[in-house]
Amino acid sequence: MPGYSPASNTTANLSQAQVIYYDRNFVANLKANTPHLRTTNRRELPENSGNQLELFMYQTLGPNISQSAEGTVGSGISVSVLNNKATIGQYADYLNYSDLSLQTAIDPALENGQKELAYRLGLTIATLLKNTMDGTSTVDASVAMPNAYNVLFTKSNIVTAVSSLLGRNVRAFQNGRMAGLVHPFPIGDAENDQTYGGVTDILKRTPQGQEKLSELPTNDEDGDVPVLDWAGVSFFSTTVVTITPNYQGHAGVNALRTYILGENAVISISLGKKEGAQIGTGDWRNMELWTNRYTTPSNSDPSRMIGGSTAYNVKFVPTLVPDLTMRMRYIDAPTAIS
């Protein structure tokens, strides 16, 4: 039986077979969780009320263990009031697209641009809050709780930090728990701790704890689910934390910062009830932007060369309470994970 002849037509001579198919479903890029705003207390600077918000706090009155003389009215005492001013700042960015680009792009470019810009806004606010949290140790030295360069993050770090806060009468949030921000590496270090009394040792003693250990803690795409609940702290995972290279002078050792916050640790102030980007009520990762397609010419664009834009304009400032006792602790610790 004669064999088959080689194909007389292949992709080499069929130009229509040499085209490229472009997958319109873009691969998701890598984004950090930015839950920092959730760990703060929020205040409003009303519109048309100036550009500064001033916080006031009474100094606590101490005890009076001296008996009052019978039948004597005595003298009244005075109170002291502390204050702190915060000046609102403005953060704005935009992306705009030519009408031709929106008509020829294979993806929904305007909507995708909105998501990328929303992340930029979320990262901006998270970084502002992180920097404010880092600065609390300059007001209150007890905020900083460093580990030795060769001691990893463990359960005892959390217990010590919470006890330190409770010892200064710092209150939890309204849900009865303090809030934490933690990098994924310290979570792994804590769960890898096999010592007696460690996180793993305690969790393994109950069916519920064993279930928690059956898989690594994760969180949803909005960072809304705590990844670790321990010693009265609900932790949210984020990579937006301070990292100290060459920790304590040891080359190659990086220390990751974990934050534990009580009520009023950081105050987040926004201008007006409706911010320009509607933080916390948006339709994409809680950061809704102004996104518009332009269908008619305008005075600034008579030929309608701009087909659409997405933008944010946020008036925001983080600040601290007017007190020398800070309501938070941070822990610097090296990690065994890379």
Image (cartoon, rainbow, N blue to C red):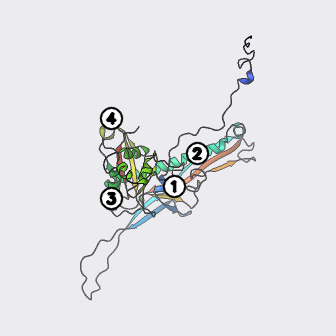
Q: What amino acid type is highlighted by mark number 2?
A: Leu
Residue 43 percent coordinates (x, y): 49, 62
Q: Residue at x 57, y 47 (%)?
A: 118
Real-space CA distance between mark 1 and mark 3, rounded to the nearest whole angstrom: 32 Å
Task: Give the quarter of the figure containing the N terminus.
Answer: top right
Disc 3 target residue: 163
Q: Of the residues under marks 1 and 2, which one precedes in the sequence?
A: 2
Q: Of the residues under marks 4 and 2, which one precedes in the sequence?
A: 2
Badge 1 marks a residue whose secondary structure is strand
Disc 1 target residue: 316
Badge 4 marks a residue whose secondary structure is loop
Task: Give the quarter of the figure containing the C terminus.
Answer: top left
Q: Of the residues under marks 2 and 3, which one precedes in the sequence?
A: 2
Real-space CA distance between mark 3 and mark 4, rounded to the nearest whole angstrom: 32 Å
Q: Residue at x 46, y 57 (%)?
A: 40
Callouts 1 and 3 close, C-beta under 8 Å: no
**Closer to the eye: label 2 or 3:** 3
Real-space CA distance between mark 4 and mark 1, rounded to the nearest whole angstrom: 38 Å
Disc 4 target residue: 251
Residue nearest the viewer, comparing 333 with 141: 333
Q: What amino acid type is highlighted by mark number 3?
A: Ser
Disc 2 target residue: 117
Q: Indicate whether 124 appears above or below 76.
A: above
Q: What amino acid type is highlighted by mark number 1?
A: Phe
Callouts 1 and 2 close, C-beta under 8 Å: no
Is residue 95 in view from this perspective?
Answer: no
Residue 227 percent coordinates (x, y): 46, 51
Residue 221 percent coordinates (x, y): 54, 48
Real-space CA distance between mark 4 and mark 2, rounded to the nearest whole angstrom: 36 Å
